Structures are given as C-alpha cells and as structure tokens.
Amino acid sequence: MDTNNITFTAENDVLSVLRLGKITLKGIFQVGSNHTFLVEVNSQGECIEAVYKPTKGEQPLWDFPSGTLAKREVAAYLISEALGWGLVPPTVLRNDGPYGLGSVQLFVEFDPDGHYFNFTDTEREICRSVAAFDYVINNADRKGGHIVRTNRGHIQLIDHGVCFHCEEKLRTVLWDFAGERLPERMCSDIADLATAINSFGKLRNMLSKLLSISEINALSDRANSIVASGCLPQPGLDYNYPWPML
Ligand SMILES: Nc1ncnc2c1ncn2[C@@H]1O[C@H](COP(=O)(O)OP(=O)(O)OP(=O)(O)O)[C@@H](O)[C@H]1O
Ligand SMILES: [Mg+2]
C-alpha cells in the first residue's frame, strides 16, 4: 500500500483514521462528472488527506441505481484486498461526511503524466492484473488516467463508481492483453475470491451492505468464469472503450 507522505506502520492505522476521523473539507477537484472533494481526516493526532465522494454529488446515470456509486468505490477496495493485490487505495464508507453518506479514499500523490499511456513495459505488465481485476468487478469506465504511478512508484487504481453492474459493461483501455492466458497465481487468487464470496462469511457480509444480491451473484459468476476460461477477456461490447480514454 502507498501511504504517501504519512508514516503508518500498518494499513489498519490508515483504515481506522479513515473510518473514525473527523472529516474537514479542503477543496474540490475540478475534473470529473461527480462532485469529488479533497478532505483531511483527523483522528488521535493522525491526519491524512483523502478523497470524499458523497452520494449527493453523484450525477444520475441511466443504467446504475441512484446514490450507489460511493458504495461501489468501497466494494472495489474490498475486492482488491480480498485478492491480495493491493491495487485500490484504502476506501471506506462514511455516513457522517460534510455532505452526508459518501466514500472516503486515501489520497494518493501522483504526477498527472504518470498514467497508463506513459508506463514503462514493466509497469504495463503489472496492468495484466488490472485487466483481470476490471473484468471481475465489471468496470464500465477504466480510463488510462485512472491507472496511476504514485510518487512512491506503485501502480494504484482510482475511480470505481461504475462497477459491479449485473450486465456486461466492461469498458477499458486495457485491451493489450485480450485473450491471453491468465497467470496461474492470479487464477488461484480469483478462485479463492469466488470461494470467499460464496462461503457467506465476512466478505459476503460486507459486500451485502454495498451491492445488491444479484450484483454479488454476478460478481461471483464472473470470477468463476474467468478462472474456468483461464484467459483474459476479449472485447465483447460494441462500445468497449471509455470516453474520454484518459
Ligand atoms: N484516491 C485518489 N487520490 C488522488 N486523487 C484522486 C483520488 N481519487 C480521485 N482523485 C482525483 O479526483 C479526480 C476525480 O475523481 P474521479 O475520477 O474518481 O471522479 P469521477 O467523477 O468519476 O470522474 P470521471 O467523470 O472522470 O470518471 C480524479 O481525476 C483525480 O484527479
Ligand atoms: Mg468516473
């Protein structure tokens, strides 16, 4: 996990600050279709910068139920953690934000030019796991600018508001790996994820507060299907790319 300019010993410390800290508005991001705020979160002398996306600031969409994007942000973090891939910065749901219910995600520092389209070959190779992740979460908007190299040199993913739809929605810039074999380790991580979702334990319980039952079942079906095929997906929709792509 990238902890930027803060010194925490464990991810739990970041999560507990995000979960319990006092949230103060610091600014608004002038890009993006939804209202997205920079905030500071303070708890017991610890202060971290975070990105707050209130459900009230979400633009209505024709295909996703209103007021659910923030929950999808949190669900994407849970799946990244369940896979053990550490791709999504720590993200929690808060119902006491300055504008009410919303996601609060650790702010990651990155150079705006440090994105997928400018990655080295080694960094692009890491994106094989991102392609698998996006298939599993059914990401309808994987822009190149939302796969970033943080100032600490880690690849991190942001913006998961439009994921987990029951119907196929995969729109991504990551078609370089289409149809290629999924590495064995990723396959077994995804198989373990499907088992965890279907075991009705802690993960499923947490997901059930964020997604509908049909969305959770569709998530589990996609995980099983990519494991069964052993290959990264091929473009399936007429419109496979996000817009804009960066
Ligand atoms: N965790 C984060 N760390 C740093 N910056 C972030 C983070 N999450 C979001 N941002 C910044 O906030 C901007 C808007 O966030 P995001 O792209 O998630 O919102 P959006 O409304 O879904 O945008 P879009 O319409 O482009 O899809 C991003 O382009 C990025 O600059
Ligand atoms: Mg978005």
Image (cartoon, rainbow, N blue to C red):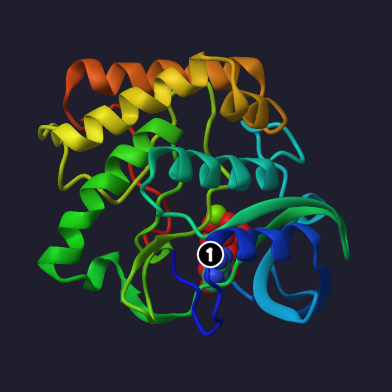
The residue that appears at 75% across and 37% down in the rendered structure is 66
Foreground residue, 141 or 15? 15
Q: Quadrant of the N terminus?
A: bottom left
Eyeballing the image, is 198 above or below 52? above
Eyeballing the image, is 120 above or below 92? below
The residue that appears at 58% across and 40% down in the rendered structure is 75
Image quadrant of residue 18?
Answer: bottom right
Q: Is residue 67 left or right of residue 206?
A: right
Foreground residue, 139 or 79? 79
Q: Quadrant of the C terminus?
A: bottom left
Residue 224 horizontal/vertical position (percent): 34, 17
Residue 191 appears anywhere in the view: yes
Residue 33 horizontal/vertical position (percent): 63, 59
Eyeballing the image, is 53 above or below 49? above
Residue 242 horizontal/vertical position (percent): 40, 49
Name the residue type under label 1.
Ala
Residue at the extreme front: 9
Residue 58 appears anywhere in the view: no
